[in-house]
Image (tube, rainbow, N blue to C red):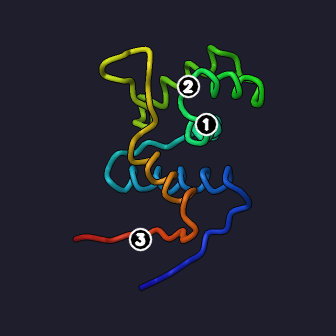
Amino acid sequence: MYKFEIKYKNDIDLVDKIISIYSINKTLKGKPVRILPYEKSILIYYLIYGFNKEAKETIMKDLGKTENQINTTNTNLRNKGYLFKDRNNRTKGYVSKDLKEMVDIFLNNKNKVLVTQFKK
């Protein structure tokens, strides 16, 4: 077994690194979906605060983004498989369940270990 450590400063930095790992995993599975830095910044807010109107308002205030810029980024994140629209209510959406679960596990547990298995 091979081990390497990934250091992080705070929860936001941890979520940033988790998104990077998740993105690499998607690419290795044959779905090359490079996430751009501004997309990652917005996705971090959704993962920490939820995918809702309040998070959108916080993004506008903290990052200086307009509603149109956020909506365009949301469309890009949907096309890349990071965000999804609710099947029953098209005005609602959610972050990828796999990514959200991964973030929640790492934020809520003291033992932050990620296992990667290579299969032939």
- Determine which residue is flagged by label 2: 52
Numbered label attached to residue 49: 1
Secondary element at tag 3: loop
Residue most extreme to the bottom: 1
Gap between marks 1 and 2, in whole Å? 8 Å
Label 3 with label 1: CB-CB less than 8 Å: no
Q: Residue at x 58, y 68 (%)?
A: 110
Q: Amino acid at mark 2?
A: Asn
User: Where 41 falls versus 87 (above or below)?
Assistant: below
Query: Where, quadrant-wise, is the C terminus in this rendering?
Result: bottom left
Gap between marks 3 and 2, in whole Å? 31 Å
- Tell me where residue 83 appears, x and y as whole percent: 44, 32
Q: Residue at x 25, y 70 (%)?
A: 119
User: Where 97 falls versus 85 (above or below)?
Assistant: below
Q: Residues within 10 Å of mark 2 (few under 14, many from 20)?
A: few
- Determine which residue is flagged by label 3: 115
- Tell me where residue 82 appears, x and y as whole percent: 45, 37
